[in-house]
Each structure stands twice: as C-alpha cells, then as structure tokens.
C-alpha cells in the first residue's frame, strides 16, 4: 500500500487506461502463484477465501504502483512544455498526510480546468494567478503524465 501512496504523490498521470491492464496481469500472476500452493489458498473455508480475496486486492494495488513507477521513472520521451495559469490553491490535511493541489486552467490535450498534486515547496512558492511550467510526457506504457515546475 505504501508503493501506491508513493506513486500517487510522485507522479501525476492524466490517463490511466494503459496502467490497469498490466496491473491486473501482475495481480493475476501473483494470485496464480498463490494458488499453485493449494494449502495456502484453500478457498473451501471462509478464512481461505478471505485471504485470497485480500491478497488479490493487495496484488492489484501493488501492480498499479509498479506499473506507474515503470511508466514514469523509465520514460525518456521528450516532454511537451506548456505555460499554464494557476487558478487557485488547495491544501488538505489529515492526521497522517498533507496534500497540496494547484488548480490550473485548460492546457494542451486537457481542455478543462483540473487540480494537480504538487509538493509543499512548489505550493508555497506559487500564488493564484502565477504561471507554472507543465511538462507532458508520454510514459513508457503510453500512459501520459505531467510534471509541474515554477
């Protein structure tokens, strides 16, 4: 679950379509490996069924995190650069986490206003009305993602 949270914080995808298929394939392989040991995956009793169900959900989440990491970290495509106006800033806080969002105007292939998760330093450095640089990259798995800088 930590990998999922880290990928959500580090990489901002604008399309998830090409991430779910490999994530589910990863999960299916992991669950198939679990099923290869019939003692560990005995679904004839309630506890075994719950264990397999929970393991499947965790495997899909882990597969998602791995695929997002692979898509973004190993992406060496040439980014398209956009200058975008910041419309507003939002900060949300929970016991365990602070999240910082910038709402930006329409840009490039995204023809609508949208909020993007940014780090605290960028959030503090930007005001509504400022312009940020948005770099659109294609992604190794062809799931486009963006980086936002000052």
Image (cartoon, grey):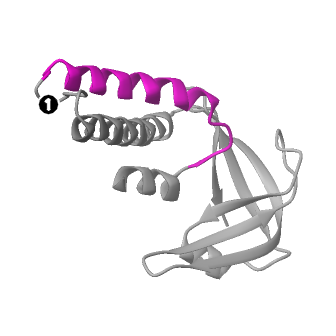
In the rendered image, residue 105, in percent from the top left (x then y), is placed at 86, 59
State the count of labels. Answer: 1
Which residue shows up at 53% across the image and 50% down it?
A: 11
Q: Mark 1: give few (<14), some (14-19) or many (20+) Cα within 10 Å.
A: few
Residue 77: name its quadrant.
top right
Quarter-wise, where is residue 131 in the image? bottom right
Q: Please tell me which residue is depicted at 35% across the width and 42% down the height of the picture.
A: 58
Can you name the residue that lies furthest to the front here? 45
- Which residue appears at 61% of the width and 77% of the height? 92
* Residue 112: image location, x then y, percent: 88, 50
Mostly what secondary structure, the magenta segment?
helix
Position of 32 with respect to 25 (left or right) is left
Q: Nearer the viewer, residue 86 or 90?
A: 90
Establish if 61 lies above or below 78.
below
- Magenta part of the protein: which range? 12-38
In depth, the one of 82 and 114 nearer the eye is: 114
* Residue displayed at 48% across by 39% down: 68
Q: Is residue 53 above or below residue 95?
A: above
Q: Which residue is mark 1?
A: 40
Up-down relation of residue 122 to residue 10 (above or below): below
**Element type where label 1 sits in the image:** loop
- Residue 141 drawn at (x, y percent): 53, 26
Figure quadrant of the C terminus:
bottom right
Please determine whether, in this image, residue 108 is positioned above or below residue 93: above
């Amino acid at each position: 679950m930590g990998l999922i949270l880290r990928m959500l914080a580090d990489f901002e995808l604008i399309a998830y379509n090409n991430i779910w298929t490999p994530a589910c394939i990863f999960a299916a392989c992991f669950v198939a490996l679990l099923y290869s040991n019939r003692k560990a995956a005995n679904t004839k009793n309630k506890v075994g069924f719950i264990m397999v169900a929970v393991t499947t959900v965790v495997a899909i989440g882990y597969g998602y995190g791995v695929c997002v990491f692979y898509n973004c970290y190993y992406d060496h495509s040439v980014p398209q650069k956009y200058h975008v106006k910041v419309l507003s800033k939002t900060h949300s806080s929970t016991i365990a986490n602070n999240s910082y969002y910038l709402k930006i105007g329409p840009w490039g292939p995204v023809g609508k206003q949208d909020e993007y998760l940014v780090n605290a330093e960028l959030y503090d450095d930007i005001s509504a009305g400022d312009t940020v640089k948005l770099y659109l990259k294609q992604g190794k798995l062809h799931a486009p993602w963006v980086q936002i800088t000052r």
